[in-house]
Amino acid sequence: MAVAFAREREAGERRCVNPAYAEPLRVLGWLSPGGHALAIQAGLPLPGGRGTSRVFALPRTSDSIHVRPLRHGGLAGPLFGSRFRSPARAERELEVLARLRARGSPVPEPVAALSAKRRLGWESVLITRYEPGRDLSQLVAESPGPSEVARIAAAAGRAVRRVHDDGGRHRDLHLGNLVLQPDGRVLIVDWDRGRAGAPASPRERARSLARLYRSVWKRRLPATVRPHAVAAFLHGYLQGDRELWRAVRASLSGAGLQLRLHALGYRLARRRGELR
């Protein structure tokens, strides 16, 4: 069963909290007025993390939490930064995580979304239980050998398959959002604007896999190990399901051209020195 979040509202602030974590967050003062600002300033920078993500040890527990201030990406980033029209975006991500966790998906455990009204909109911070590990973009940069690549890729394939089967739609699936944990499993993080519904269709799966493959090109996974990575990933993802593979492959026809165009674009950018 998905978490039933406790919701609190007062002038200029909103909080959406997993009751299992309410007491330690209250001890910290994060559920009091001004708690949003305290959460942003707490903890240590997440190793290899994106932006201003931080890790913080919860009092009176053995858990640590991942504190991530929400920011606009892409072209909207420089214009709007951390300002949003409402707190809804953070709260929706928290709810998506709760639904997927309840279905057994490898996603972070949701803790809280804290939001505060500012002059030009709302600022929000999303808090999840911290799971140690390293994202796959970091691991690729270390040029692992074929056997190590195959092991990691197979684990990633199993994780993505489970999320798709559980109805998860990740808006930005790339190597940086796949985290290899110490036990060898892969966690899928950063569900901003993601969704959880019915199992993903072949077309949705194909689109997601194509985006992940473009990420492999962008990270320059060496040609000597790329075939091992792709084969192992598909083995982990398909798990012998030939009918699924036929359906996904049929939907990849358009994505195949897109992949080739991206590959050409990356090659040209490298020649011009735009990618380092």
Image (cartoon, grey):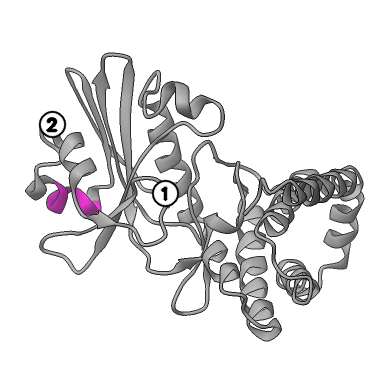
Residue 161: x %, y % from top left? 67, 61
Residue 251 is left or right of residue 101, and the answer is right
Residue at image position (62%, 48%) is 167
Instruction: Kindly report the distance in space between the C-alpha atoms of the residues bearing marks 1 and 2.
Output: 28 Å
- 147 left or right of 258 in image: left
Locate the C terminus and report the quarter of the image it occupies.
bottom right
Query: For the magenta stretch, what is the residue range?
Result: 20-25
Q: Tell me the amino acid under the disc marked 2.
A: Gly
* Residue assigned mark 2: 34
| Mark earlier in primary sequence (1, 2) | 1
Amino acid type of the residue that numbered disc 1 sits on in the rendered structure: Ala
Mark 1 — residue?
Answer: 2
Q: Which mark is residue 30?
A: none
Q: From what the image shows, is residue 236 above or below residue 64? A: below
Q: Secondary structure at mark 2?
A: loop
Question: Quarter of the image holding residue 246?
Answer: bottom right
**What kind of secondary structure does the magenta stretch mostly adopt?**
helix
Callout 1: few (<14), some (14-19), or many (20+) C-alpha neighbours within 10 Å? few
Q: Nearer the viewer, residue 196 or 175?
A: 175
Q: Is residue 118 magenta?
A: no
Measured as percent of width and height from the top left, residue 253 is found at 92, 47
- How packed mark 2 is, by other alpha carbons closer than 10 Å (few <14, some 14-19, many 20 or more), is some
Judge whether 258 appears above or below 140 on screen. above
Task: Identify the residue at horizontal 71%, vertical 72% (top origin).
Answer: 236
